[in-house]
Each structure stands twice: as structure tokens, then as C-alpha cells.
Image: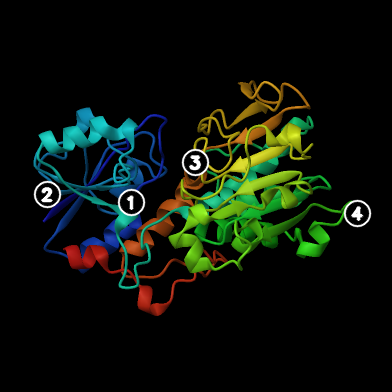
Amino acid sequence: MKIGLLKETKIPEDNRVALTPDQVRTLKQEFPDSDIIVQSSDIRAFSDGEYEAEGVEVVDDLSDCDVLFGIKEANTDTLLPGKHYFFFGHIAKMQAYNLPLLQTMLRKKLTFSDYEYLVNEKGERVCAFGWWAGVVGVYYTLRGFLLREGDESLPKPDRSFTLAKLQAELEKAHLPKVKLLITGNGRVAKGATYILRECKIQELTLEQFLSDEPVEHISFYQASLDELVGRKDGQPYDREDFHNNPEAYESHFIRLARHTDIFISCHFWNPKAPVYLEQEDFEKYHLPIKMIGDITCDICGSIKSTLRSSTHDLPYYDFNPISRQEEPPFSSKDNITVMAVDTCPNALAIDASRYFGDMWCHRQPDRHEGHHYQEWGTDREILLLGRFL
């Protein structure tokens, strides 16, 4: 079998790759009857030369490959007829904007594996960047808040940014004395709380968070689901019931929002579930929220001020709570600044690519350098590519 690593063709550009140079070398050694080649790219986090230094062939044309691995959706013009593709497709939920992609895949008689739906025997996803989205989302959100205040001390990540660099920048920044709220308890939230704890940011109890007393340092609270919603009929919250009957619940978010300066959304949201923030809530309840990092980026979903996604080049825009319209970022102290980059992990393309590839290469993600990533147990070691070969 001949496998090709695709050049990313989606705009805005993505610098990640499914396998790093050393991971390709390892797989080629373990599976000598198969070959892996790389499509030349000038945007990838790892250069063509780094692959060639590991003895990997770099080419422009992948038409002789059997299987093609990418990260984001491939440009429809680049899809090769009759091939098997792996990437994050964003089509399984019938996303209208990717209907042309699905139609092209059908017309060209492709077969396709979507990373998002690869799961282990427990039904848990085995290929995901969510932890990295949480880490980067926190950085972008805090950088946006500082920019609102005229503070440019947190630099914009470049292609060489790493987790260690990001943490070092946060640790030396003069962060504001504000309360930060995090929602969710999945991979994204674990990444967000990881970087906050690593940077020694104070974690509050619910009682402390709801107190009217000002904080002496930047502080955060991670809200659990039973603190965000409750049954409309007054019956006790039940997690399984909520997932089965989300329409029977109402939002209790305003109680927390009244004490929130910065809100970082890391929760999964079902369209049948309660809305946490309506557009009119900011004015109606005189909420102190001035910065929202919507990492999950559900457009006009549980947070109605998320009017659209944003990009790494232009991560921020303002939401005017009176007109309920978008305005330029940092244009008024009375606006709410929104960060809604939907490809946050790309800001740490080197580390995120290495982590992603480790899940394919018969080994658990590296913890040696303090990168705790996910709680992958030995029963979750991913052998997907080996089985495929």
C-alpha cells in the first residue's frame, strides 16, 4: 500500500499534518511493505527538507497513492477520483457549507474516513485536537482582553509557537484582576484548565466565585453542568436525563454570568438544550462580561453573541449589546469582544501535529515534557494505522 500525506488546501490555511517526519520514518520501519510519501507544501509546520532528512520522499503528485491523509477538508478541485481519504470532514451533521464537498466526493467515487467518528470500543473518540483548542483558546482570550485594555504584552503566535513558549508568555504577562468562567468538562475544558493551573492562576470555589468581593489576582471557576441548567419542573438534575431530554431543562447561566468578567466556552451544546446567553441578556441583566472566548464556536448557538467564526489572522470582533450587531474589535469599552477561532490548535501546529501522529503510531501521546494532554489509559492505545496497513 502507498500512503500520501496531503498538502493542506483549505483557506484559511492550516499548518498541521497527520504525521511528523520522525513518525513517518517509524511507520516505514515498522511496515516495510508499505510506503508513505509526502506532498510538497510551503505552509506545513514541518518543511519538505525535514521529511527528506528522514528519508521520506517528497512529491507534488499523489495520484499513485492508495490512501491520502490530511487534516482539514480538502479543496474539491484537488480530490483524486477513486481514492480513500482521511480528514476532518465536517459533513456528517449535514453542514450546508460543505455540501459541495460531499457532492464532489460522491461524484468522484471516493471512500472516506472522518477522524471525528473514529472511536474505540467504549465509543470514545480516538483522534481529536480538542485539548489543544482549550490551551490556545485561553491564550487567545486573555490576549484579547489585554488588547482591550491597550496592553500588547502577549504576542501573536507565529508558526514556530510551542506549548512551552505559550506558557512562558502567559507566566510573565501582567494579567488583570478579574474572574474567568469556564464551562464544560471534556477535552477542550481539560486543555483550558491545564494551562491555567500550570500558570498558577487561582482556582475559586463556587461560593468564592459568586461572592461580590473583588479578587486580588486573576482567578477562574470551572462550572459543572448541573450548575448551568436545571429542570423546568423543579425536579432534580440528572445527567442522563439531560442528555436524553435537553428540552426539559432551562438555563441557570445568568447566576454565574453576573460575576463573570471573562467567559471561556468549552462545553458541548445540543441545539435542543437551553441557550446560555441571549443577545439581549447583556443589557437586560447588566452583565459585567467584557470578553468571550467561544472555543466551541457554535455560531449563534448557546452563546448568541457568537455571530460568526474568526481566524488566526483576525481572531477578534466586537458585539454591541445595544444594537446587537458586530463592530470592529476593541472599538468601544461598552462592547463585548468575541474570540471565535474555530481552528485554535493550528496556533501550536508543531506540538499538535506531533500529538496527533502519536495516536496513530502505536504509542500514547508523550507525557515526558509535562504535556499531560488527555488521560489515555493503556487500553486506549491507538493502533488504527497499523491495523489499516
Quick check: can you spot residue 204? no
Which disc number belongs to residue 250? none
Q: Residue furthest bottom?
A: 378
| Mark 1 Cα-neighbour bin, 10 Å: few <14, some 14–19, many ≥20 | many
The residue that label 1 is drawn on is: 18
Q: Position of residue 17 (x, y in %)?
A: 35, 47
* 184 vs 377: above or below: above
Label 3 residue SS: loop
The residue that label 3 is drawn on is: 298
| Residue type, label 1 | Ala
| Residue type, label 3 | Asp
The Cα atoms of the two marked residues, 1 and 4, are separated by 48 Å
The Cα atoms of the two marked residues, 1 and 2, are separated by 16 Å
Quick check: can you spot residue 297? yes
The residue that label 4 is drawn on is: 213
The Cα atoms of the two marked residues, 3 and 2, are separated by 35 Å
Label 4 residue SS: loop
- Residue in front for this viewpoint, 11 or 318: 318
Q: Nearer the viewer, mark 3 or mark 1?
A: 3
| Residue type, label 4 | Glu
* 40 vs 29: above or below: above
The residue that appears at 84% across and 53% down in the rendered structure is 217
Badge 4 vs badge 2, beta-carbon distance below 8 Å: no
The residue that label 2 is drawn on is: 66
On screen, residue 337 versus residue 294, left or right, reads right
